[in-house]
Amino acid sequence: MIGLDTNILVRYFIKDDPEQTRVAVNLIYSLSLTEPGWVGVAIFMELDWVLNNVFKLKKDRVVEIFNTLLISRELVVENAETVREALYLYHSRNTDFSDCLIAASARAAGCSRTVTFDRIAARDAGMELLG
């Protein structure tokens, strides 16, 4: 298994640097069921930030990219079910992916609730407003 950093996935999906894109695409195409790539949960948070803030992608495109990662047979996604739940919340609500992932991760860990001072996260990510 080969761990993938966020910048590899950015080059693969965005293709903003010709040389790094070529290398990233070749690496992604070389992955297989016997030697898959590994995508950690932190990658999704970082990738979301880069795609939204640097490349100004629309939410639907980010969701499409994340779904591509989740369904790829040549990738192993850390806590894939939690990421899927977070992605569902993100796609269907008006909140940040990171808040959705925090809430989904807390539920997966068995937390009875996740508290926040963030009104939007409380309303749309299923957290409980504190205070």
Image (cartoon, grey):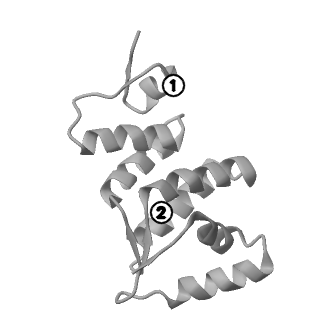
Q: Residue at x 43, y 62 (%)?
A: 40
Q: Residue at x 64, y 74 (%)?
A: 12
Marks 2/1: CA–CA distance: 24 Å
Q: Is residue 30 above or below residue 3?
A: below
Q: What x and y, as percent, mark residue 8? A: 61, 72
Q: Is label 2 in a helix, a strand or a loop? A: helix
Q: Is label 1 in a helix, a strand or a loop? A: helix
- Quadrant location of the C terminus in the rendered image: top left
Question: Number of marks in the image?
Answer: 2
Q: What x and y, as percent, mark residue 106? A: 30, 39
**Which residue in the rendered view is the most extreme toward the top?**
131
Q: What x and y, as percent, mark residue 39? A: 45, 67
Q: Is residue 65 above or below residue 104?
A: below
- Residue 19, quarter of picture: bottom right
Under mark 1, the amino acid is Ile
Whether pointer 2 and pointer 1 mark residues with C-beta atoms closer than 8 Å, the reply is no
Going from N to C along the chain, the mark reached first, 2 or 1, is 2
Under mark 2, the amino acid is Asn
> Crowdedness of circle 1 by 10 Å Cα count: few (<14), some, many (20+)?
some
- Quadrant location of the N terminus in the rendered image: bottom left
- Residue 81, quarter of picture: bottom left
Q: Residue at x 58, y 51 (%)?
A: 48
Q: Is residue 6 above or below residue 19?
A: above
Q: Residue at x 44, y 50 (%)?
A: 87
Q: Is residue 20 left or right of 80 when viewed as pictured?
A: right
Mark number, residue 67: 2
Q: Which residue is mark 1?
A: 120
> Which one is nearer the viewer's eye here, 25 or 61?
25
Q: Is residue 59 left or right of 85 when viewed as pictured?
A: right
Q: Is residue 101 left or right of 7 when viewed as pictured?
A: left
